[in-house]
Amino acid sequence: MMPRRVLVTGGAGFIGSNFVHHLVAHTDDAVTVLDKFTYAGNAASLAGLPEDRVAVVRGDICDGALVDELVSAADVVVHYAAESHNDNSLDEPRPFVDTNLVGTYTLLEAVRRHGTRFHHISTDEVYGELELDDPERFTERTPYNPSSPYSSTKAGSDLLVRAWVRSFGVRATISNCSNNYGPRQHVEKFIPRQITNILCGERPRLYGAGANVRDWIHADDHSSAVLRIIEAGRIGETYLIGADGERSNRMVLESILTAMGEPADAYDRVADRPGHDLRYAIDSTKLREELGWRPALQDFARGLLMTIDWYRDNEDWWRPQKAATEAKYRELGR
Ligand code: NAD
Ligand code: DAU
């Protein structure tokens, strides 16, 4: 039998590259990555993968002709490409509109023409924020209420997918996942920023009081969930992905400091992010009961230690990003 041909958009980013590694390890699929290699894309994240299994195309998901050609040669499209960072979206929203909305539209028109199976990667941020003491968590039925330019463009892209399923019969599924951590995450994001600050002898930076809660999942578990949805998910359905990993930012930062041999209070408090969502929390019952998925790594302390070790051992990967990232944060006062 011919191997399945999978087109992974954004496959040079943090979670997309994790998924490419996952596909190579757990399937016989032939993978094509389509990535623009923005500041967030990194060829080193795909290093070492077999060339006869993984092809890499540098290009923009807004480029209709290129997207059409690649989609025509794929059996499945898994769409990770996005502008992904909230702080950037508050500073300069335009690329978020282009990539997250127009890019998703461009892919949807191509899969519609070619009848290709499509899986759309999205975020729990489309649901807005929860109160700290709210006993409810997000489910597939929670109304959309995004806060930032990032989350509103992701919400818009989800709605485009739903409309293309209903109006044009596109064979698509959507997943909304909580905060990922693990190797190969850009140093602009919370956990790698703090780890690499400490490795550089700089103090970590906590926004506001650090009471905000995020629901952490290891990127490997996100990838196994996406593969399960592609293989067994029902067309037109949305699945929430989460690993019951709620923690306040302050708790996470103190864990990083302690694990790296620093006093737990050796950080600076900086200006809060405007419109900062208080809490996200995922109820992934549907995915677990309908598709039998379970996270493999629920021990956050162990996952954090593995992540710290990865950044300690892979300075060549992150060092080129660090100075420019911190310069940008200095301009934002964070
Ligand atoms: P990332 O910023 O690390 O990677 C994004 C990738 O997309 C990069 O390789 C970049 O070069 C590429 N890209 C950007 N614009 C492009 C364009 N116009 N054409 C082609 N490629 C383009 O992001 P990430 O954290 O890996 O997130 C990947 C996806 O997962 C996003 O859709 C994001 O919304 C979603 N998601 C992320 C998280 C998280 O915690 N990071 C959680 C849930 C969902
Ligand atoms: O919930 C899923 C989302 O998680 C994804 O859709 C996004 O793509 C991803 O970036 C992430 O969004 P967050 O805004 O939650 O992640 P970030 O790593 O930017 O920040 C996590 C928390 O840490 C947030 O409450 C802000 C805070 N923070 C962040 C940075 C960079 C700090 O306190 N200090 C920092 O230096």
Image: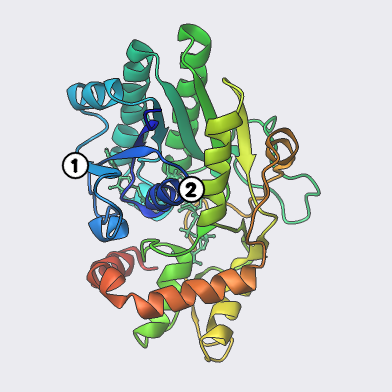
Earlier in the chain: of badge 2 and badge 1, it is: 2
Which structural element holds mark 1?
strand
| In-image side of 264 versus 1 (left or right) | right
Badge number at residue 26: 2
User: Crowding near pointer 2: few (<14 within 10 Å), some, many (20+)?
Assistant: few
Left or right: 72 in relation to 306: left
Q: Residues within 10 Å of mark 1 (few under 14, many from 20)?
A: few
- Seen in the image, is 202 located left or right of residue 180? left
Image height of 4 relative to 201, above or below: above
Q: Residue at x 36, y 68 (%)?
A: 333
Label 2 is placed on what type of residue?
Answer: His
Q: What residue would you read off at disc 1?
A: 58
Q: How is the image coloured?
A: rainbow
Q: Is residue 42 left or right of residue 6?
A: left
Quadrant of res 293: top right
**Gap between marks 2 and 1, in whole Å?**
25 Å
Quadrant in which the N terminus appears: top left
